[in-house]
Image (cartoon, rainbow, N blue to C red):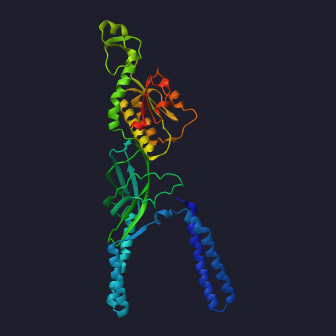
Amino acid sequence: MDRAAWRRFFLALLALTLSLFLALYATSLRESGRYVLGAAIAVISLLLAGLVAIKVVPYLARRTALDRWMTKVEYEFTWEGGAYLAVIAVIAVAALNTGNNLLYIVLSCLLAGILVSGVLSRFMLAGLELALVLPEHVFAGQPAVARLRLANLKRYFASFSLTLSAQTPSRRKRVKPGQALEPAILNETLYIPYIPPHSSVSQSVELTFPRRGRYSQEGLRVSTMFPFSFLRKAHTVPSRQEALVLPKVDPTEEFYEILPLLGSEVESYLKGRGHDLYAIRDYQQTDTARHVDWKATAKARQLKVREFASEDERRLGLVFDRRLPNARAETLEQFEKAVAFCACLAWHFYEIGAMMRFVTDGFETSMSPAAEIIYPILEKLALVEPVLGDVPDTESLFRDSPSATEGFRIILTCRPRGSIPTEQWGSSYFVFMDAL
C-alpha cells in the first residue's frame, strides 16, 4: 500500500470539503450584504481548490496505473452498425417532426443499445494477457507448432468472441531510416469464442517461416464485435516475442548432386592421412593418383592403390566465405542457396557423428563433435549477412581455416576459381556459389 499517496488523497478530500463549505459561506455573506468579507472567503476557497489541483492531483495521477482503464481502443464501423445508425437517424427525424412520445421512447432505447454495446465490448477487451510459446528450434520452411495462451485476468467477467490478428505495418514499432523491419511471427487470424473469468485458454498454432533470420512480435491485435456487432473494437495486447529461424536443413537437389563427389574426396583424404598400411586393392575411379602403388601395379599389371589405417575419427572443417563481389539480385540469391547448402552439410555431418569445425568471418568453433556445435553453427548461419567487396588480405579466411592435420576442409565461396591458392586444393573441397 502506498501510504503517502493515500495520505495525500484524504488531505485533498478534506481540503476540497473545506473549500466547498467556504464557498457556501461566502455565498451567504454576499446575500447578507457583507460583500468584502464574502469576496475574501471566496478567494480563499478558490485558492484552496487550486492548490489541490496543482499539488495533489498530478502526484496521485503519476502513481495510478492509468493504462489499466485508459487503454487505447480502436473503433471500426461494421455494416450492421451503419444500418443501425441509419435507422436511428430516421427515427430521430420522425420524432422531431411529429413530437410523438412513443418515437422518443424508441429512440432512447436504440441509443441505450449503443451505450450497452460500447460498455460490454470494453469489458471484453479489458484484463487480457497474452503469451506465445515457440519450440526451442525452428527451421525455415518446416511447420512448427506454437502454443498461444490468452488469459482473462478479470475476476467476475468473462470475455466473449475475441479475434486475434497480427498488427498491421502502420501499427507496428517504428524503425530508424535504413533499418530493416523484422517480419512478424504470427500473421494469421485466430478466433476464441469464450474465456471464463480469471482463467485462460490455450490454442495450438501451426507456423511456417519462409526464410531464415530473426522474427519479432511486439503484440497481437485483439478485437471483438460483442454483443451486437455494431462496432469492431480492437486494441493491442503487448507481448514481446522473438524467434530465431534456422536455415532449412532439408537436402536440396544440389546437395544430392555434390554429396557423392564430396564423399569420395573425404574418404580418399581420410584413408590417405594415416601412416600405417592397411591394404592394397584395385584402383577405383574415385581414388586419388597419389595413392597408386606402382610396384604392385607393375607386378599385377593392373592399377593398385594403397589404403592406410585412419589415425583418428572423421574430422572435417566447414568454411563459409561470406564475401560477395556485388549486391545484384542473382548474387544474393546464390548467397542464400549457399547458406542453405552449408546448413545441409553441417546437419549431414551431425547425423553421421563426425568431428567438425566451422569457420566464417568473425566466428569459428573448435574441433568438436558435431552434436555439440550444430546449433551454434545454425544460429550463426541464420543471421549471417554478406560482405560486399574484396578485403586487402584475400587469403586470411583460408589461413584461419583448419590445417591439414585437423581434417579435410569443405569451403563454400563466391570467389573465382583462379583466385584460390594452389596449396589449398590438396586438402580442401571447394563449393562455388555460382554452381548451386
Q: Is residue 178 above or below residue 428?
A: below
Q: Quadrant of the C terminus?
A: top left
Q: Is residue 237 above or below residue 214?
A: below
Q: Position of residue 284 (x, y in %)?
A: 31, 19
Q: Is residue 413 left or right of residue 57?
A: left
Q: Position of residue 33 (x, y in %)?
A: 66, 92
The residue shown at (33%, 82%) is 87
In the figure, residue 288 lies in which quadrant? top left
Q: Is residue 230 above or below residue 32?
A: above
Q: Is residue 288 above or below residue 247?
A: above
Front one among 107 and 397: 397
Q: Is residue 356 visible?
A: yes
Front one among 323 and 111: 323
Q: Position of residue 223 (x, y in %)?
A: 37, 64
Q: Is residue 316 left or right of residue 57?
A: left
Q: Position of residue 398 (x, y in %)?
A: 50, 29
